[in-house]
Image (cartoon, rainbow, N blue to C red):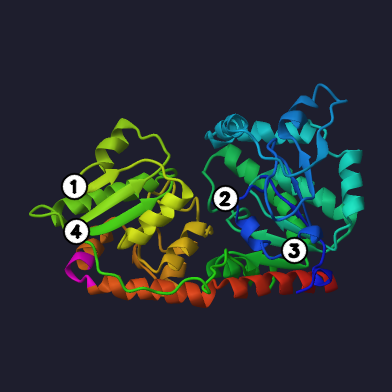
């Protein structure tokens, strides 16, 4: 496609675009876009460093905070791709990686409510880039929805929304007064975006069904794409013992699901080691987690870089995907669809998935029969025992995972979906 055929797209999000972090789905979405036809507004203090585009506007959250008392401070500015030092990155990562209380999260919203971010610099950036289409990921923060609504009204351009989590219903939040108030506030802003959107993109079939029912839309499913032109399915001899691998965080009750796997491995491995689980995570373990996870052939190995993650996944027989089954946490990621899933499918490995049957990932795996799933604690030892006794299932579900990825997440399909949706929005 020639550059003249690309609509000019303005993306408005939270994080700067930085290549090779493994966490920025939007970089993969726009990887094939004309870099002169895309711009990005974001709200972190860090600087971008990506091949995707060169046109950025940063609204610095620390400066928005200071602007409450220092009204002449400049909170927004044009910025360019700039490699940052490890110290700068580490400082900001430390701030934003911390889990904040509900009260602190609400206080942050009031900072943005009182702070100065509607500026002449922002308006000038919007006017000079003059986008054809606005691309808005929907976040769980009120301030981002307010910023996006301001840009929508200021430019009067068509909007494409991208929804990758449950950032609208009350089902996924904690049952506390602050959570209900925050979600009510969020919904008042998000509803304006949904009602004004020309097109809505979602991340999973379950989310499409739910949001289409709420808003009377016909949304489009869009996920991270897989380039199958460079990979093919390879039947591999299983390790002995069978090697399972989990790479990721232990938050929101996920470690409890992993602990149940370790517990079940006690009976399976009581006479000889038949199956192992290696857990790779950057999280610091509590004494309780150390005891629950390092036993019976299960071991926590620490953090990996992206290349190392890909290697251990290639060498594994079974890749583990977990969400919490605890009532407190089981709906927290109810409509999410982790990029880990497409990475697992790409690797053509058997997936062992744990989670409530109502959440989008488990619904997806069951819908397309692309993983072995356990939807209760009681099913975990049963399903693991079946795998050990029937190793041919591992090979069967490895092929099923690969074929599912090829059918539903091929990068050519995803690229076409994105460009078709944006062009259709521009024409509405």
Q: Tell me, yes or no, if residue 293 can be seen here.
A: yes
Graded by Cα atoms within 10 Å as few (under 14), some (14 to 19) or many (20 or more), the crowding at tag 3 reads many
Query: Does residue 161 appear to the left or right of 105 in the view shown?
Result: right
The reply to whether callout 3 and callout 4 are in contact (CB within 8 Å) is no
Q: Is residue 277 above or below residue 30?
A: above
Query: For this view, does 113 lie left or right of residue 334?
Result: right
Earlier in the chain: of badge 1 and badge 2, it is: 2
Along the polypeptide, which appears first: circle 4 or circle 1?
4
**Distance from the alpha carbon under mark 4 to that under mark 1:** 13 Å
- Which label sits in the foreground, 1 or 2? 2
Circle 4 SS class: loop
Viewer-proximal residue among 20 and 286: 20
Magenta span contains residue 96: no
- Horizontal and vertical percent for residue 407? 51, 78
Q: Which residues are magenta?
A: 387-391
User: Mark 4 and mark 2: span between their CA atoms?
Assistant: 33 Å
Give the x, y percent position of residue 45.
70, 35
Residue wearing tag 3: 160
**Between 259 and 392, which is closer to the camera in this rendering?**
392
Which of marks 2 and 4 precedes in the sequence? 2
User: Where is mark 4, residue-wise?
Assistant: 241
Residue for badge 1: 296
- Residue 428 in sight: no
Q: Magenta residues: mostly which secondary structure?
A: helix
Residue 321 position in % (x across, y down):
39, 57
Q: Quadrant of residue 34?
A: bottom right
Between the C-alphas of marks 1 and 2, the distance is 35 Å
Which disc number belongs to residue 20? 2
Q: CA distance from mark 3 to mark 1?
A: 49 Å
């Amino acid at each position: 496609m020639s550059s003249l055929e690309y609509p000019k797209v303005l993306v408005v999000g939270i994080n700067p675009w930085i290549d090779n972090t493994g966490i920025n789905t939007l970089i993969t979405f726009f990887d094939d876009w004309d870099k002169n036809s895309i711009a990005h507004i974001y709200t972190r203090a860090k600087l971008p460093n990506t091949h995707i585009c060169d046109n950025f506007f940063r609204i610095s959250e620390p400066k928005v905070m200071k602007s409450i008392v220092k009204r002449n401070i400049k909170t927004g500015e044009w910025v360019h791709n700039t490699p940052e030092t490890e110290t700068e990155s580490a400082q900001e990562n430390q701030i934003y990686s911390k889990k904040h209380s509900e009260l602190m999260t609400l206080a942050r919203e009031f900072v943005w409510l009182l702070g100065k971010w509607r500026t002449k610099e922002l308006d000038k950036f919007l006017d000079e880039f003059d986008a054809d289409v606005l691309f808005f990921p929907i976040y769980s923060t009120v301030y981002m929805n307010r910023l996006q609504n301001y840009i929508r009204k200021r430019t009067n351009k068509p909007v494409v929304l991208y929804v990758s989590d449950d950032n609208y219903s009350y089902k996924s939040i904690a049952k506390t007064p602050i959570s209900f108030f925050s979600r009510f506030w969020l919904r008042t802003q998000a509803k304006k975006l949904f009602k004004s959107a020309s097109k809505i993109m979602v991340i999973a079939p379950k989310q499409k069904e739910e949001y289409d029912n709420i808003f009377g839309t016909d949304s489009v499913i869009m996920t991270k794409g897989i380039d199958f032109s460079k990979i093919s399915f390879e039947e591999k001899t299983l390790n002995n013992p069978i090697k399972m691998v989990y790479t990721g965080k232990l938050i929101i009750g996920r470690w409890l699901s992993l602990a149940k796997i370790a517990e079940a491995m006690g009976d399976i491995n009581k006479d000889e080691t038949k199956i192992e689980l290696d857990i790779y995570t950057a999280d610091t373990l509590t004494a309780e987690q150390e005891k629950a996870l390092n036993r019976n052939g299960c071991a926590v190995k620490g953090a990996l870089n992206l290349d190392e993650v890909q290697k251990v996944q290639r060498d594994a027989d079974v890749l583990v995907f977990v969400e919490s089954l605890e009532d407190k946490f089981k709906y927290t990621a109810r409509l999410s669809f982790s990029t880990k899933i497409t990475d697992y499918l790409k690797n053509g490995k058997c997936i062992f998935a744990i989670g409530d049957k109502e959440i989008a990932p488990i619904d997806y795996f069951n819908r397309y029969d692309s993983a072995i799933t356990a939807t209760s604690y009681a099913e975990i030892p049963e399903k693991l025992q079946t795998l050990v006794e029937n190793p041919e299932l591992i090979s069967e579900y490895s092929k099923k995972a690969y074929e599912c990825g090829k059918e539903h997440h091929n990068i050519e399909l995803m690229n076409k979906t994105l460009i078709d949706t944006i062009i259709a929005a521009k024409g509405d």
